Amino acid sequence: MIKIRPLYCREYSGFFILGGRKIRVMKRDKLVAHMLMILLVFAWGFDYIPVKYALKTLTPMCFLFGKYIMGFIIAVLLKVVQKNRKLIRKKDIPFFIICSIFGEIAYFNCEYTAIGYISVSATTIILALVPAVSMIIERILFKKKTGKKAVAGIVLCIFGVSLVIGADYAEFFNGGSTGYILAFAAVLCWNVYNYVTSALEQYDSVTLACTQMLCTLILLSPAAIHSMPLISEIPVRVYLCIIYTGVLDAGIGFIIVIYGLKKLGPTISAIYSNVLPVTSTFFGWIFLSENISLFQIAGGIIVISAGYVVIREKQINYDN
């Protein structure tokens, strides 16, 4: 007689017990985090379209000022809803100022100015060098060991970028070099921001966002107000661009990033960010009619893939 074993299914610590066998499944909060990060990568990729349009009317400083006003309002509202009354310590104010200078003002000013000289796709591919440059800095300044896989990833990143620049050598010698230099400067600025921010880990994400945006607005205000055109001279579409980037990038986007970091960890979150050149290239091709050569596509694939290796190795080193 054949015995029929009952089939049962129950949930247990991120697993499903199905017929006595343990099957690992993705928890609901992680699934939500993955979905939000995917949407955010597409939103960030599209972000360059309104930015490039708005910069025809505004300077990068003016645009950043408007963008962070929107982001600051959202962060303050969130702080009020959470009844978060935490304040920062006086001794940490210099760290917040440095973060604002490098991570907000210098980084975005270099990035936004760069897309005026080179394509959005080329700019974002250069920005994907952040993890590779981070490991080089750690090796030189902090004497941290670098594994063979990480070294190979860094070499491949550099090779991929050389393909992107080499495929566009004619534009490089006709003013494009300025764009590439600015994009590389943005990479360095973001690494400075990352290291300084590590000294502020004791603050919750909302307090961190509010304070950094407030410092950014204070530092930006003299240059922004001086170069701001008359309100009547600013097209309605530019206001919509500022609202879109301020709400989605500086506001909601920041919240999603923090949620992703908590649910998925820094490695997976960084990998999502490294895929940004794919979505930005797609939207640049659709809305800005930007062309990308086969060499640039190959270079972009190499940079993104090698960046994935570097990010994984970096996380393994930290875990050990």
Image (cartoon, grey):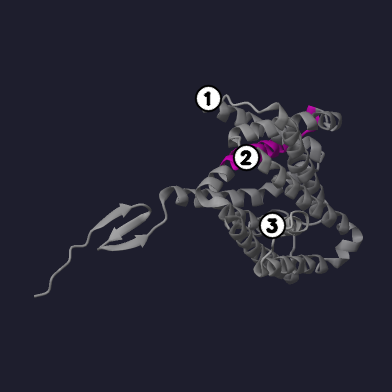
**Rendering quarter of residue 221:** top right
Residue range highlighted in magenta: 231-255
Residue indicated by mark 1: 83
Secondary structure of the residue carrying tag 2 is loop
Residue 235 visible in rendering:
no
Measure how far apart labels 2 and 1 are at the Cα level. 20 Å
- Sort mark 1 into few (<14), some (14-19) or many (20+) by Cα contacts within 10 Å: few
Q: Amino acid at mark 1?
A: Lys
Measure how far apart labels 2 and 3 are at the Cα level. 20 Å
Question: Residue 58 at x, y = what percent?
Answer: 80, 38
Residue indicated by mark 2: 201
Question: Residue 205 at x, y = what percent?
Answer: 59, 37
Q: Is residue 98 above or below residue 231?
A: below
Sequence-first disc among 2 and 3: 3
Q: Nearer the viewer, residue 6 or 167?
A: 6
Question: Residue 81 at x, y = what percent?
Answer: 52, 27
